[in-house]
Amino acid sequence: MQRIEAPYGAWEPASVTEVAALFSPLCELWWVAGGYAVEPAVGRAFRAHADIDVLLLREDQLAARRALAGWEWWAADPPGTLRPWAAGEILPPGVHDIWCGPGPYAPWRVQLMLDEAEDGHWVSRRDPRVRRALGTLGATTPEGVPFLAPEVQLHHKAKARRPKDEEDFTAALPVLTVGQRRWLAETIEQTYGPHPWAERLRG
């Protein structure tokens, strides 16, 4: 297990298997997100990860606390200051990220991401015009682990284009279907304007 130092304490990211064990009791929808969401589509691990992200719908945020009872929870208030998330508190729309670990002195293990839903559709935090029916937002590995569709995750990553985002896009590009490429190119241009990824998707 890799230990990574961060400004608010060390990370020892949970594995995908551990995340599945933690969140599988939930009746609510959840998906492995971030860089790990790209790996099932690619069919292999291709880079290291500093953390592991789990996407939940905002309306289901308290269900996660029930599933991980006794864990330590900190919310990232914009522009990125961590503060304790009080039991029973409903986090407002501006708060999207939550760090959690099994105790007050334990390393962080999982980062939760909260996204909006409306009328049975996921709504992108990057652009509320970008929506997907919840049933098409992701897929499931043969082991039964739900993960975010790679084109959805790459739409989110297209804003920053950090080295790891470029690596994820390059790895995913050859395995995206024609429909996935079309959706991603169109939504990237709608959200961000002219973009090199859109050009490569159509190339």
Image (tube, helix red, strand yellow):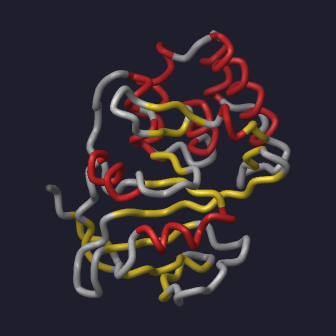
The picture places residue 38, in percent across and down from the top left corner, at: 44, 33
Q: Height in image: 125 above or below 58?
A: above
Total label count? 0
Residue at 37%, 63% (x, y): give it. 110
Q: Nearer the viewer, residue 102 or 123?
A: 102
Q: What is the x, y in percent for residue 193?
A: 79, 37
Q: Residue furthest left?
A: 1
Q: Nearer the viewer, residue 196 or 152?
A: 152
**Residue 82 located left or right of residue 71:** right
* Quadrant showing the N terminus: bottom left
Q: Is residue 105 above or below residue 124?
A: below
**Residue 77, percent across and down?**
59, 80
Task: Tell me the quarter of the image containing the C terminus.
Answer: top right
Is residue 1 left or right of 126 when viewed as pictured?
Answer: left
Q: Residue at x 28, y 75 (%)?
A: 102
Q: Residue at x 29, y 87 (%)?
A: 104
Q: Foreground residue, 117 or 151?
A: 117
126 relative to 141, above or below: below
> Quick check: 22 left or right of 176?
left
Which residue is drawn at the image coordinates 82% and 36% (left, top)?
190
Q: Residue 162, how many percent across, how many down?
A: 47, 46
* Rendered position, 176 above or below 135: above
Residue 168, located in which quarter of the rendered image? top left
Image quarter for residue 89? bottom right
Q: Is residue 182 left or right of residue 80?
A: right
